[in-house]
Image (cartoon, rainbow, N blue to C red):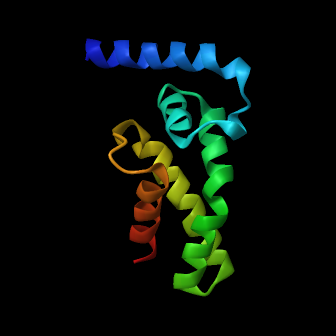
Amino acid sequence: MRRRNNRAEETRQRVETWHPFMPMSQWSDERLVEAAQAGNEEAFAELVRRYQAKIYNLALRYTNDSETAVDITQDAFVRAWQMLPKFRGEANFYTWLYRISHELVH
């Protein structure tokens, strides 16, 4: 557990020293995920902004109902936030998010 805390602290320090030089909208997904895993809610909000339309369109394709698609989109991001500490970066963030969303529509 101590190693995980050290890793989180190192990530937090990297994010804090890097943040002032570039707006979050220009951060890579990997950087945003690291920041969000370290507790930065703004970084996760940027990921939401980046992918909410894609997830909504995916849900709409499967449900053909805009209200249901909005609910699925919201549920997908809530679930992603809850599961974010388990995200290991073995896939792209969007691929992981797509998979979460796909499970919700089926």
62 left or right of 46 in image: left
In the displayed structure, would residue 49 be above or below residue 88?
below
Q: Position of residue 61 (x, y in %)?
A: 57, 83
Q: Is residue 26 left or right of residue 44?
A: right
Quadrant, the N terminus? top left
| Image position of 60 with respect to 84: above or below | below
Q: Disc count in the image? A: 0
Q: Residue at x 74, y 31 (%)?
A: 23
Q: Residue at x 55, y 75 (%)?
A: 59
Would you say 10 lies left or right of 17 here?
A: left
Query: Where residue 5 appears, x then y in whole percent?
Result: 35, 15
Asked whether 64 or 10 is in front, the reply is 10
The x, y position of residue 32, in whole percent, is 56, 36
Of residues 56 and 72, the one nearer the viewer is 56
Residue at the farthest bottom position = 64
- The image quadrant where one finds the C terminus is bottom left
Q: 94 or 37, which lies in front?
A: 94
Identify which residue is drawn at 69% across, 38% down.
26
* For residue 64, above or below residue 31: below
Q: Position of residue 72 (x, y in %)?
A: 55, 68
Q: At 63% from the left edge and 84% from the top edge, which residue is drawn?
A: 65
Q: Please determine whether, in this image, residue 75 is positioned above or below residue 39.
A: below
On the image, which quarter does residue 84 sit in? top left
